[in-house]
Amino acid sequence: MNPGASIDAIKGVGDVTAEQLRQGGISTIYDLINFLPRAYEDFSTVSNISDIQPGNVTIRARCETVATRPVRRGMRITTATLYDQSGKIQAVWFNQPYREKQLKTGEEFVFSGTFEFSYNRYQLTNPSAEKTADLPVASHQLLPVYRMIQGLKVPFLRKLLTEVKPLMTRLGETLPVEVIRDERLLPRGEAVAAMHFPDSPDQLARAKERLAFEELFALLLASQLNKEEMSKLEGYGLPFDQAIVKQFVAALPFELTGAQRLAAWEILQDLEKSSPMNRLLQGDVGSGKTVVAGLVARQVAYRGYQTAIMAPTEILATQHAATLDKLLSPFGVAVGLLTGSVKGKAREQLYTAIADGTVQVVVGTHALIQSSVVFHRLGFVVIDEQHRFGVAQRQALLSKSDKMPHLLAMTATPIPRSLALTVYGELDISLLNERPKDRKDIETKIWSPNSRSQLYGLIEEQLKLGRQAYVICNLIDDNPDNERKSVEAEYKKLRVGDFKHRRIGLLHGKLKPDEKEAVMRQFSNGDLDILVSTTVVEVGVDVPNATVILIEDADRFGLAQLHQLRGRVGRSSHQSYCYLMVSSSKAPSRRLKEVEKSNDGFYLAEVDLELRGPGEIYGRAQHGELNLQVANLADTKMIKRAQQAVQRFLKSRTDLLQYTQLAKEVETYQRLTTLN
Ligand code: ADP
Ligand code: MG
């Protein structure tokens, strides 16, 4: 057997199993070896039922009774009574009805899960269950847990891994020898074998260190190489014209903040270079990113190039087009709007105007990346709320130019410093860490339903002053159809209830684009007092006269989402208010309390990172495709270490190609992260 061989070369793997493995992404023995555990259960800490304390616990027990019942639509709960020689305990699984069949076998299992107080009693929630008889004898302390492969039983997978274990230790080295030596890392083969068959927690830690280091090394090396390659690309050098910028700034109805000036300056500097800009503009909600993009677009138009601005929703694209038109038309710069609802003749005309350069600034949704959109001279690309777009969409827009256009990605989701290096390694970063000076903190308060009429009184006070309010509703359960129901119900309730004398609008994702736009226009023109909406207004929407946002069922939203929603108010010099209505009588979560306490998006991002972990936040959203199996993006120390090793490696001018496997990994990362 050699690692390159197909999976059916292993004794005991027939056609069916081989196909199941292939479906699970394992085609070769090498793939199997690299199918690393996603977690470990620590059986060195098996407790007696009578001794367990709240927290993570592992017990060895049998099942006395087990039953499954439906609770609400689509949700099933399986409860079981488990026992060992010391006592009994209740276990609960959500939507895992197969547990019933599994436990009826009467055998002894090892259960591992969280022991907690919920639904008025102590219980073991969603524990894993492994037949004691199936547990490998050798690793009786730390048991690897693997991602599920359809149709494949874990004990069988372990058997296969045991078959190929001898191959593991003979795996070739992937990291440069100097790196292994300087960082005192385990050899690759030893590390991989220890991941599957750990002898001790210590050895496992060393194995994880080695593999995490390798992943980060490859990722950081890829972004360094991308950066180097970018700097060699030929772009458009657009000389800075002070008079033009001054004129733009003088015409603004407000004074730019220091942070806005600095960011604009950094961008204009980049534009002068012949290599393309690759910059992220990070600014908290309401910090004024749009005007910075507008200022730069003015300069770009003056130099005879076009700007494309891509926004994630029609509502936002429409709003940006209006804002930029107001800012730019006085200087004779034509702004166009391209979304899915621009149709027929109007669309054809717009295509022509984009192609001949009459329209200099094109704002749109992902409609911009369609092949029918041809630019005259695209020099500057802005991606608003960039975390809402994939790499492919960014690249598609950038490729609509002869040379590489300058890129500005904007985001209101601040990313903690420690993470910027890995998640945005190849980007330069500008920060808007200052709010316009007339802004006050948004007063934020958690409310419970029994004070609702008092709260409505406060909202009414604001409406009497001529201000406007948002009421945000969330899903009642996991069924997206019910989102609409809940927002419609709220709308009806308010219209006949406390606010029947008010003009109320309704907005949700199921409306047609032109209906959405009409409601949004009414609200931003002040023709509506209250907008009852789903989270479609979550990002970007800017109606400065709105000073109240009431978020219903606030405990169902994530921290970043709450902060974004709150950012819909506090966009003028008026005092603004955010009310977080909690549905249950439970004590408010830490999440809600933090939002109540702080208006600072950067601080809240740190809290979010602490509460949820980087995998949840950045894992899927940013690096879903990157497949970091072991590395922890919150491990700042390790990231720094890997970064330094990358610098040393680049300085040593070692030829990467002599490390075939590493070069391949780096290339994959490069392809996935590159912007060109
Ligand atoms: P975001 O950074 O969330 O995208 P916007 O660009 O939508 O923020 O700006 C928020 C609001 O603040 C807009 O109404 C904008 O006109 C206004 N604004 C931007 N910069 C300033 C400033 N320096 N002073 C006062 N108001 C500003
Ligand atoms: Mg914005």
Image: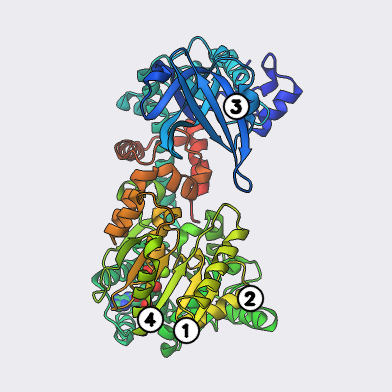
The type of residue carrying mark 1 is His
Element type where label 2 sits in the image: loop
Q: In the rendered image, which residue does mark 2 sit on? A: 341
The type of residue carrying mark 4 is Leu
Side of 488 relative to 235 (left or right): right
Q: Residue at x 45, y 87 (%)?
A: 329
Q: Is residue 305 visible?
A: no
Q: Position of residue 447 (x, y in %)?
A: 35, 61
* Above or below for 328 versus 3: below
Nearer the viewer's eye, disc 3 or disc 4? Answer: 3
* Above or below for 75 versus 90: below
Q: Is residue 557 visible?
A: yes
Nearer the viewer's eye, disc 1 or disc 4? Answer: 1
The type of residue carrying mark 3 is Val
Q: In the rendered image, which residue does mark 3 sit on? A: 66
Q: Residue at x 40, y 28 (%)?
A: 56
Q: Position of residue 237 (x, y in %)?
A: 40, 69
Label 3 close to label 1 by CB (< 8 Å): no
For marks 2 and 1, the one nearer the N-term is: 2
Q: CA distance from mark 3 to mark 4?
A: 55 Å
For marks 2 and 4, the one nearer the N-term is: 2
Direction top: furthest residue: 137
